[in-house]
Amino acid sequence: MWFGKKKKTEEIFLEAPEEGNLWQRLVRDFHSKELKKRLKDMGLRRVECYSDGTVDIQGFYGDFAVNVQIDPDEIALGINEDEPDCDEIYTYDSIPDGDFYGFLKRRLDFYEKGEALPSSKEPREGLEPMADFFAARAEGYDEHMLSEVEGCKEGYPLMASLLPKSTRSLLDLGCGTGLELDEIFKRFPDLWVTGIDLSRDMMDRLKQKHPQKNLMLICGDYFRVDFNDRFDAAVSFESLHHFTPEAKKKLYRKVCESLKDGGVYIECDYMVDTQEEQERYFAEYDRLKAEQKLPEGYYHYDTPCTVENEIKLLQQAGFASVEQVFRKGGTCMLVAKKG
Ligand SMILES: C[S@@+](CC[C@H](N)C(=O)[O-])C[C@H]1O[C@@H](n2cnc3c(N)ncnc32)[C@H](O)[C@@H]1O
């Protein structure tokens, strides 16, 4: 996403220090022809690389047409049997170890073999970084949610049933393996979905379940990714109970702005009853982070807010009406409508 005047890649190439960031290193590789060489070495055929502010790669891998667009903020990947179009977006911090070539090779193999690779992450003791936590549990995740988490089995079909009949485009925050989308696609088979998630391992399961659907998957942090489109509806299921009310309020504002007039946001999440409970969870999270001397970042630990606070945050973010429609155990569903 560009802001202001574009910088030519030649200028970046000349200015970038030897050890630049990944974007600068890729521009450097483009100009030194290293990019093309590395792509051919990994098995890409008929590779063409262009530069016009961004770096564009086109080629073929097995039966797939491959299109990669690299810009200063993100890398968009289209790997399709027919027309290439960009259907996966990666922010730079979601590329493991900044290793673009290894990452691209794994994506190509994922598509060619049609199966998710085993995750490189293992469950660990103590607080785990959010993306690692879910990567280590992507396998078996669906069964866990449907059989172990009270209210989920009923919540997924309910969410699908509450979307307005006219919904054509949907934003899903923390889409994961797409349990809510499994139900939503039953009612809206031609829906255009933009799903955002920190964990590529989780989204690979979603892609495997719905290879033919109109899915644009963004591997990144929904607090930081720009929602460039306008959507008829947005949803989030069991994802936001890890974040502070302040962060959520900003996110809800962004969601509200990204909805068309009359649009609806449906959230199903873990919520608690009292302010004391909410504060206890946040205090314990702070204590654990301090005890484990963890640097800034997102760690997996439940910090649910009260239903009342959630409703207030959504109202303050600009939603005209907010209603609680479901509760089972700690799982609650809210429907927020934009005026
Ligand atoms: C409990 S799972 C829910 C997945 C799916 N919505 C469901 O109900 O099955 C939570 C998901 O939110 C994602 N997530 C957590 N924080 C995120 C963030 N800041 N940005 C994007 N995704 C995030 C996690 O990676 C994980 O896949």
Image (spheres, rainbow, N blue to C red):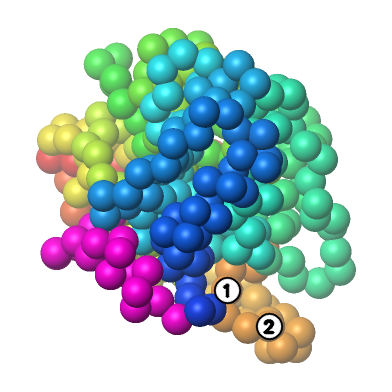
Quarter of the N terminus within the rendering: bottom left
Amino acid on which disc 2 is placed: Leu
Amino acid on which disc 1 is placed: Gly
The quadrant in which residue 30 appears is bottom left
Residue for badge 1: 297
Q: Secondary structure at mark 2?
A: loop
- The reply to whether residue 97 is visible in this rendering is yes
Look at 77% across and 30% down and name the residue there.
143
Q: Is residue 114 above or below residue 127?
A: above
Circles 2 and 1 in contact, beta carbons < 8 Å: yes
Reply yes or no: does residue 155 show up in magenta.
no
Horizontal relation, residue 214 to residue 113: left or right: left
Reply yes or no: does residue 13 show up in magenta.
yes
Work out how far the residue at label 2 is from the one at label 1, CA to CA, in angstroms. Answer: 8 Å
Please tell me which residue lies in front, 279 or 106: 106
Quarter of the C terminus within the rendering: top left
Counting from the top left corner in percent of width and height, residue 266 is at 38, 37
Counting from the top left corner in percent of width and height, residue 67 is at 45, 33
- The reply to whether residue 202 is visible in this rendering is no
Q: Residues within 10 Å of mark 1 (few under 14, many from 20)?
A: few
Horizontal relation, residue 319 to residue 250: left or right: left
Look at 66% across and 64% down and name the residue there.
97
Q: Which residues are magenta?
A: 1-17
Q: Is residue 242 above or below residue 264?
A: below
Look at 35% across and 44% down and name the residue there.
50
Mark 1: C-beta under 8 Å from nearest atom of ligand 1: no
Counting from the top left corner in percent of width and height, residue 84 is at 42, 24
Q: Is residue 302 above or below residue 189?
A: below
What is the count of numbered marks? Answer: 2
Look at 50% across and 23% down and name the residue there.
65
Residue for badge 2: 294
Q: Residues within 10 Å of mark 2 (few under 14, many from 20)?
A: some
